[in-house]
Amino acid sequence: MKVYIKFFTILFLKSFFYVMAIMLSLVFLLNLLSELEFFKNIEVSSYFPLFLSLLNSPSMIFEMFPFIFFITAQLFFIKLFDNNEIDTLKYSGLKNTKILMFLGIISFISGVLAVLIFYNFSSNLKNVYMNLKSPHTNDGKYLAVVTKNGLWIKDLINKKTLIVNSSKIDKNYLIDNFITEFDNDFKVSRNIKSNKIDITNKKWIIHDAIIYEKNKKNISGTLEIDTHFNYETIQSLYSNLSSLSIFELYELRQNYKSLGYSITEVNLQMLKLTSYPIYFFLMTLFSSLLMFRIKYQYNTALKISVGLFLTVIIYYLNNFFVVLGSTERIPLIISVFFPLLLLTIINSFMLERVNER
């Protein structure tokens, strides 16, 4: 049995790294073209887009891992079928279920390692990527972040910079606010204190505003200011969650929760990470069972084409449920795990008489 395990491990790893190399090359090339397009009118070093592409590629590869494992399993069986090694294994008494069990275990363990190690590695690189690229975007002008000290908003409008700090969001209102307004030379022109700001529209209505201007304190019943933000834009302005490690996601969730800020996207990201080992297992099993079904019926190119077609369907089905979850049309746990349940049911039907194939 140890000989079989060694043989399967080497063959599976060879297939995985082959697929991984192809996917990584494609992702890197697409990233590079995107960065070159972005910087075509910006003066930077010729190596800068190349470096950014290297930093951004691992986080994109992480999202593709379930499909990489699907294709890896296909390649694994294609090599077994082409050399008729699968029949040799069968005649030696090794059942197909044993092969499936091995692939399932190795894919599940790989999923755990991918989440605990590769995800944190790729998220750190993504964070560096965003920090390096942000000075060349508008992110430095318009920004909304949540920390343990509350919600912070930076806005540049009408040649004035606004720094807003609020303790929490309550429906369409910012609560306990302090606004510092800077002029074009970045000198403080005035400070505004308010218990409540209506952010339904991008023209904020500041209630019971206290204005500190030129060392004078003025009380204004209601004050209106123009911004680039309203309730919807603030609610959607999450940090790029793929740039946050698991521990940072948990901390962000706690900060959002304490502020009354929507934690839907953070919970969704954490549930997706939790489901990944199961996702890897099911995708590998589905690919393996499919290969047993079409064992000698089609040539290699057609087998791979069928696999790629099915991965696209699974990808869009999964994304469809994720969108339903992120918009809170269905519970998050259903949006993440229902596609996996469907895969489990399909796999269960395909497992029938698998040892006879």
Image: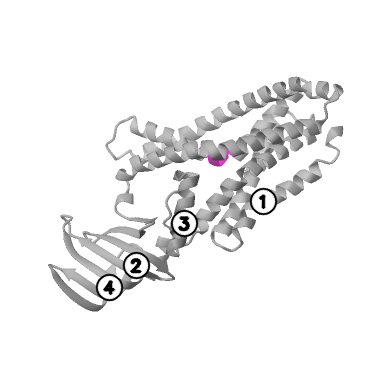
Circle 1 residues within 10 Å: few <14, some 14–19, many ≥20: many
Report, in whole angstroms, how far the alpha carbon at label 2 lies from the one at label 1: 38 Å
Residue type, numbered disc 3? Gln
Circle 4 residues within 10 Å: few <14, some 14–19, many ≥20: some
Query: Is the C-beta separation of discs 2 and 4 under 8 Å?
Result: no
Report, in whole angstroms, how far the alpha carbon at label 3 lies from the one at label 4: 32 Å
Instruction: Provide residue 91's location: percent of width, then percent of height.
Output: 86, 22
User: What's the residue at 45%, 59% (across, down)?
Assistant: 256
On the image, numbered disc 4 is attached to which residue?
224
Report, in whole angstroms, how far the alpha carbon at label 3 lies from the one at label 2: 28 Å
| Observer able to see residue 137 | yes
| Disc number lying in front (3 or 4) | 3
Report, in whole angstroms, how far the alpha carbon at label 1 lies from the one at label 4: 47 Å
Work out which quarter of the rendered image holds the C terminus and state it.
Answer: top right
Instruction: Provide residue 36's location: percent of width, then percent of height.
Output: 37, 36
Q: Which color mode does the image show?
A: one colour
| Disc number lying in front (3 or 2) | 3
Residue type, numbered disc 1? Pro
Instruction: Provide residue 84's location: percent of width, then percent of height.
Output: 79, 21
